[in-house]
Amino acid sequence: MFTSTTLKKLLDSLTAAARNKGLNDAAWAQAAGFSKETLSRLRRRSSCDLSTLIALADACGAALSVTPFAQPATTSDGHLPRELSRDYEQQLLMLCASRNLDPAAWAAAGPAFFMAGLAVMLASNADADRRSLLALAEVLHTGATEVPVFARWLKRSPLRPSRFLPMLAMETQHAA
């Protein structure tokens, strides 16, 4: 499931592709197997199924693709992102909501120390797979689960648990 700004960007790109092919909304929606009203409602929604996006892409001769995480600029020690843009925050939310605990996926998403701290933070959630998240954190950055190390992460990280965890709860609700 795609959400919020990601969905808007995808629909904007697909709309541009439809227009380049000479399709107005009615013709594009019909080619995708939807009514014009369904397409209009989709633009006001905050989430959408992948099959809907694929149908819209196929109808205008476009393709959906997966791109790797855009690695943010890091602090001078390379341990943390210098800032947390909304796009990067959304990528992190999607990774966390997916419950994918593959170390390679997490390592690709950001600096090892930062991602390890994120895993430790997630382990604090009541419904989290605590043991697996803490093991992931240790794979990413040895010692990340130690209290002084996590305290340093909390102090230095641009990600604020008080903002991120409620957003993740909303993202997880929509994905369910």
Image: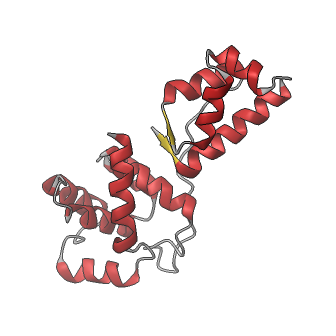
Quadrant of the image containing the N terminus: top left
Query: At 69% from the left edge and 14% from the top edge, which residue is drawn?
Result: 31
Residue 13, horizontal then vertical, whole percent: 71, 39
Quadrant of the image containing the C terminus: top left
* Image label count: 0
In the rendered view, would you say 70 is above or below 102? below
In the rendered view, would you say 164 is above or below 13? below
- Between 111 and 2, the residue placed more toward the observer is 2
Residue 164, horizontal then vertical, whole percent: 38, 66
- Between 66 and 104, the residue placed more toward the observer is 66
Residue 137, horizontal then vertical, whole percent: 26, 62
Toward the left, the furthest residue is 131
Is residue 71 visible from the viewing direction of this image? no
Residue 132, horizontal then vertical, whole percent: 18, 52
The chosen color scheme is secondary structure
Query: At 43% from the left edge and 65% from the top edge, which residue is drawn?
Result: 111
Residue 96 appears left or right of 74: left
Residue 21 appears left or right of 91: right
Is residue 164 visible from the viewing direction of this image? yes
In the rendered view, would you say 106 is above or below 145? above
Query: At 39% from the left edge and 47% from the top edge, which residue is drawn?
Result: 105
- Between 77 and 110, the residue placed more toward the observer is 110
Query: At 47% from the left edge and 79% from the top edge, which residue is drawn?
Result: 77
In the rendered view, would you say 49 is above or below 94? above
